[in-house]
């Protein structure tokens, strides 16, 4: 166990070194979320009247936070697929290191990157008028939720990365999953305008429950959508937590098994 | 003692449609070099991956350093070094970063990892490039770094999968030298290659494989004898072909082979025969477009061992039955 953590840390450190050697990587992974903050704030923010004190940006920021951490799925998958393709994973596998250390290390690395990205986004949000009103404790808890959500999703990314051969395919798969999930949700607009069937989907969508949980933790009214009486909309914190636990319980063992299964 | 033993390995892909290994057996005596020689698609990489615990065979068994690769892959990994067909290092990191990382993964301490990295970089002539990202390395430098990474804990058994494929002649020479030094140090080596010359240079014994099975085995001399040694080859203008044919036939004493503008035939005395041919050509006032001795290539080995050329065995289902029909 001690060895496993040691090995995973070496792999994590490798990712940090990559960022140090190629700082552009860091710039690109933070520039997109900052761009989203600015675009939504100034392009849509002016024309969407939410009646929300403090303006649309208060509702918007949780959505962008969740969307950004959701993309961890794709970035984890792409990073791993590239390592697979270059034969680096084979080399790691031929070393006498602990089972799973390589993929655990990668999830740690991507989680660290998420902390940084969240910090940059929070600063950008603050600059354009976003102000959480719930106090330091709840705000911290919100970020902890976001961090955990990203971490849970990166385990799906691991399985995708181990299963798909081409890094480019992985990228497309990642976007195909995350885009509909983030837009079929309450992240950017209320779900009231959607057809009934989509509303149900949006309601149970983990992105929605996460956004709602964050909004609540940042001190906003629980703005969920049309069918506001359902269980996930009443209990977004609990639902989100449940989703994360379920995701990890499924994908961690599946990924480790896939990594160690070398019949192909 | 045998350091590597593979027995009756079978490995299929795509639910049995592609037979990568078909009852392959080989062994490597401790402290010697086995060259596994075969064309693209023969099953070299598959063999290496099985022996290096990266792949499970469908059936058959293998031991490395006396340890079963299927039952105790973890223990095997402690004994081996592997440098795969494509340099498998982190391209964004520097050579130094990579070696230190691998040292740490082998559970060397921080300082030992650094020392070992510096040693290896120096030994492989990479000290100057040590702080540059691998992306900027030439093909030869990459391969050397990749090899260095597989030597971090001084493994007793080393697998090198096509270590010089894709390198220019200079890079190939450098690599050969590096490998020869390793062998002097007493490592047991299994090396795969597509070049007879490479196996000839580096290996004590050669196993020729084709379509997933060993079709010939022996020292490079025995194999060459089987193939027929060197050939004299002269290319001339079509008008001079007949005369040239006579000259070559006389020197060789064997049947000649005429192909468009080239006449060739086996010769026994190498350069002496070449000189004689030059003199005879000069006397006959024929100016050869090209003249030389040709060592048997993999193609020649294959032609004489199997009766078909060493073509790529892309075993697409459609291509089945077409194999071996060329020539
Ligand atoms: N993952 C795979 N899926 C399907 N076929 C494969 C796979 N890997 C190798 N093969 C096939 O198995 C055969 C042997 O491949 P390989 O061991 O890579 O040969 P070599 O290294 O000698 O070029 C080839 O026909 C190749 O196409
Ligand atoms: Mg190969």
Image (spheres, coloured by chain):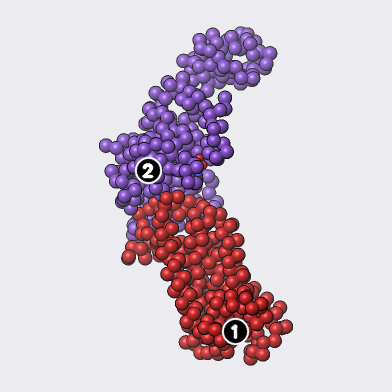
The front one of A24 and B225 is B225
Chain in red on the image: A
Which residue extends farthest right?
A: A47
Q: Are there few (<14), some (14-19), or many (20+) residues within 10 Å of tag 2?
A: some
Kindly identify the residue that appears in the image at 72 percent across and 83 percent down: A47
Residue A149 image label: none
Residue B276 drawn at (x, y percent): 53, 12
Q: Report whether the residue tagged 2 is closer than 8 Å to ligand 1.
A: no
The front one of B240 and A36 is A36
Q: Is residue B59 left or right of residue A233?
A: left
The answer to whether residue B184 is seen in the rendering is no
The residue carrying mark 1 is A227
Mark 1 element type: loop
Q: Are there few (<14), some (14-19), or many (20+) residues within 10 Å of tag 1?
A: some
Which residue extends farthest left?
A: B1
Residue B59 image label: 2
Residue A31, image quadrant: bottom right
Residue B247, image quadrant: top right
Q: Nearer the viewer, mark 2 or mark 1?
A: 1
- Which tint was used for chain B? purple
Q: Are marks 2 and 1 on the same chain?
A: no
The front one of B112 and A219 is A219
Q: Report whether the residue tagged 1 is closer than 8 Å to ligand 1.
A: no
Chain label for disc 2:
B
Kindly identify the residue that appears in the image at 53 percent across and 66 percent down: A73
Residue A33 drawn at (x, y percent): 60, 73
């Amino acid at each position: 166990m001690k060895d496993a953590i040691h090995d995973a840390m070496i792999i994590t450190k490798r990712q940090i070194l990559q960022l140090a050697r190629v700082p552009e990587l860091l710039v690109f992974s933070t520039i997109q979320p900052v761009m989203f903050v600015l675009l939504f704030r100034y392009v849509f923010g002016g024309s969407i009247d939410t009646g929300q004190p403090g303006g649309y940006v208060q509702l918007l920021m949780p959505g962008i936070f969740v969307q950004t951490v959701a993309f961890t799925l794709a970035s984890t998958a792409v990073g791993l697929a590239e390592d697979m393709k270059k034969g680096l994973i084979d080399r790691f596998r031929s070393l006498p290191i602990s089972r799973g250390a390589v993929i655990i290390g990668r999830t740690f690395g991507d989680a660290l990157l998420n902390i940084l990205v969240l910090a940059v986004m929070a600063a950008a949000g603050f600059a354009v008028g976003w102000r959480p009103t719930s106090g330091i404790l709840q705000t911290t808890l919100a970020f902890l939720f976001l961090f955990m959500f990203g971490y849970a999703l990166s385990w799906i990314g691991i399985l995708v990365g181990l299963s798909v051969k081409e890094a480019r395919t992985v990228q497309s798969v990642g976007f195909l999953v995350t885009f509909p999930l983030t837009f079929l949700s309450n992240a950017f607009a209320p779900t009231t305008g959607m057809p009934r069937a989509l509303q149900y989907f949006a309601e149970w969508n983990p992105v929605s429950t996460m956004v709602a949980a964050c909004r609540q933790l940042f001190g906003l009214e629980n703005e969920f959508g049309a069918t506001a009486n359902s269980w996930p909309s009443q209990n977004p914190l609990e639902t989100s937590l449940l989703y994360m636990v379920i995701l990890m319980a499924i994908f961690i063992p599946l990924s480790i098994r896939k990594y160690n299964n070398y019949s192909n | 003692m045998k350091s590597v033993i593979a027995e009756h390995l079978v490995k299929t892909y795509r639910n049995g449609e592609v037979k990568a290994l078909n009852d392959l057996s080989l062994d490597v005596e401790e402290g010697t070099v086995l060259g596994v020689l075969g064309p693209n698609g023969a099953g070299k990489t598959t063999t290496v991956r099985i022996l290096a615990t990266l792949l499970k065979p469908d059936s058959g068994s293998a031991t490395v350093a006396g340890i079963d690769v299927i039952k105790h892959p973890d223990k095997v990994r402690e004994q081996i070094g592997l440098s795969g067909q494509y340099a498998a290092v982190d391209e964004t990191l520097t050579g130094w970063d990579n070696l230190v990382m691998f040292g740490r993964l082998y559970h060397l301490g921080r300082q030992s990892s650094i020392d070992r990295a510096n040693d290896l970089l120096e030994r492989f002539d990479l000290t100057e490039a040590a702080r540059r990202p691998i992306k900027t390395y030439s093909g030869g430098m990459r391969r050397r770094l990749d090899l260095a990474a597989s030597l971090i804990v001084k493994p007793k058994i080393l697998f090198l999968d096509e270590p010089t494929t894709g390198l220019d002649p200079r890079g190939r020479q450098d690599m050969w030298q590096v490998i020869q030094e390793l062998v002097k140090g007493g490592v047991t080596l299994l090396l795969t290659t597509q070049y007879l010359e490479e196996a000839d240079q580096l290996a004590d014994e050669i196993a020729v494989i084709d379509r997933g099975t060993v079709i010939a085995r022996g020292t490079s001399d025995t194999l060459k004898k089987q193939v027929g040694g060197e050939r004299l080859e002269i290319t001339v203008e079509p008008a001079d072909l007949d005369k040239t044919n006579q000259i070559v036939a006389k020197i060789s004493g064997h049947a000649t082979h005429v192909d468009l503008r080239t006449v060739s035939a086996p010769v026994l005395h190498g350069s002496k025969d070449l000189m004689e041919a030059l003199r005879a050509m000069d006397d006959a006032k024929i100016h050869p477009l090209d003249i030389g001795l040709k060592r048997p290539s993999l193609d020649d080995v294959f032609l004489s061992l199997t009766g078909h050329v060493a073509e790529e065995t892309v075993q697409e289902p459609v291509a089945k039955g077409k194999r071996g029909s060329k020539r």
